[in-house]
Image (cartoon, rainbow, N blue to C red):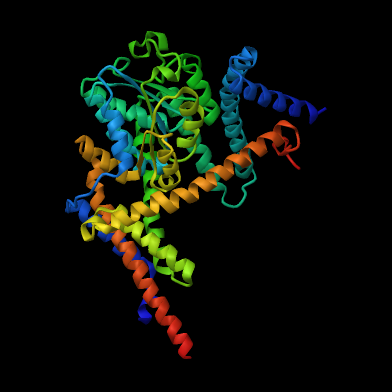
Amino acid sequence: MDFLMRLDRRWLYLIVFAVVLWPLVLPLGIPFRVSPGTMEAYKVLDALKPGDTVLMSIDYSVGGSPDIDPQAQAVFRYLMKKNVKVVMVAFVDQGVQFAEKMIREQEKLGKKYGEDFVNLGFVAGVEVAISAFAENVPKVFPKDNRGNSIDSLPIMKGITSVKDFKLVTEFATGIPGPAEWIRQVGTKYKVPIVSGVVTVMYPQSLPYVQSKQLAGLMGGLRGAAEFEKVSNTRGMATAAMDAQSMGHLAIILFIILGNIAYQMEKRRQVKK
Amino acid sequence: MRRELPMLVAGLSGLIVLLGFFFENLLPWAFNWSKELTAWGTIVSAFAMGLAAANLILIHGKRLTFKNPNWYNSAALLLSMALMVYAGIFAGQKSYLWKLLFDNLMAPLGNAMFSLLIFFIASASFRAFRARNVEATILLIAGVLVLLGRAPVGEMISSYFPVGADWLMNVPNVAGNRAILIGAAVGTVATGLRLLLGIDRSYLGGE
């Protein structure tokens, strides 16, 4: 077991690389269940009617996007499929680009900017900005991200405050996240909030689901895959689940091997 | 006066927003002023972003001018910054340059940084995640259970893994996080009061 103690970390990197790559090339199709948080989120989104207007806040940057972007994409695709109107906004500067990317894809499929969706853009100020936006949408965004006047967009007719949205969905990698949206919108305006967060934020956001302050919660890539499964809109997250499984197994194997080596070393030292 | 005036402005602003939130109908003037102050907040934040950019240019400009150690990193930063500003403002977000920089450079680089985490986790799981005592062993078992319970492969091995992981996430985890949240909320109220009353002046710099 001496070799375990002296094992070069590059071997570990190589093993991880191989086991994660393998299912991406040859998918295994391991079945998975849908967690209650995602199921609740789906039920709320499924209850929306064509013509309803939903707010999507894209509050993530490139750093955490592999874990959260598939969630936002899956929800946006589903809302488009249901002919629900989507107003996109960002309280993290790079969020605007992700929103624009999603919109461009739907434009290629025939959906119309200004009627089916709009990208309002980014405003600085995090929680203060959310509060100002919730109070008076046209005051904070007199123009959208493409420079159109808000008054000229059919989708924005009748939208004055956050109360005019049937639902708020927000996708976050940090601040602002569920806590900020609950404080400034959920509590004050009683608008239901569905949140999508990166995996590391998932445990700390769970109390808000139990207290019903969040109508649904999706966690990381797994949450995206669950939403794709339940809404029947298969995408990249489902494909990545096998790789995630293999990655988890590799880490568990390393924990076991590391502990075997540690215990053997301890016994050897006691014998000495 | 240099300290008193900012303290007065901060205290009054905080008080008006608080009164506007709690006494919307009773004190409509406070409510209207709080709306105005909140809108100002976004403008001040935008200025703060500009100030941060100017500060960054000053710091790295000095490093570049005086050829400090690793000055080429500062040069790379300033060049990248200028390029992104040019692409975003002058070329526009629909331009080829912007798409090239954001979609084909910035996003993949960010994704790569995020993906590298698995290699650090793999190395740490082998070298640091050890059952050294009872507490570490409990943490290790809980960690493995959640790892297996949250991955589809765990469900395939045994249906008990997701049940165990769900229990850990929904009972001990939520209890602990709720305690932290409530504690932090009480702390925030106390900090807010200290700021409003001028006891905490750390936002003025120093002290």
- Is residue B24 or residue B44 the one in the foreground? B24
Residue most toward the right?
Answer: B1
Front one among A159 and A142: A159
Q: Residue A227 location in percent, x, y? A: 27, 38
Identify the image quadrant of residue A58: top left
Q: Is residue B17 above or below residue A170?
A: above
Image quarter of the N terminus of chain B: top right
Q: Residue at x 31, y 36 (%)?
A: A40
Q: Residue at horizontal 26%, vertical 20%?
A: A49
**Figure quadrant of residue B104:** top left
Residue A53 vs A58, above or below: the answer is above
Let me know if residue A149 appears in the view: no
Foreground: B164 or A152? Answer: B164
Residue B155 location in percent, x, y? 24, 55
Image position, residue A55 (x, y; %)? 38, 24
Q: Quadrant of the C terminus of chain B?
A: top right
Residue A233 rendering spot, x and y as whole percentages:
21, 35
**Count of numbered tags:** 0
Q: Is residue B111 left or right of residue B175?
A: left
Check the image and report above or below for A117 versus B181.
above
Q: Residue furthest top?
A: A152
Q: Is residue A135 left or right of residue B62?
A: left
Of residues B170 and B56, the one nearer the viewer is B170
Res. A108 in view: yes
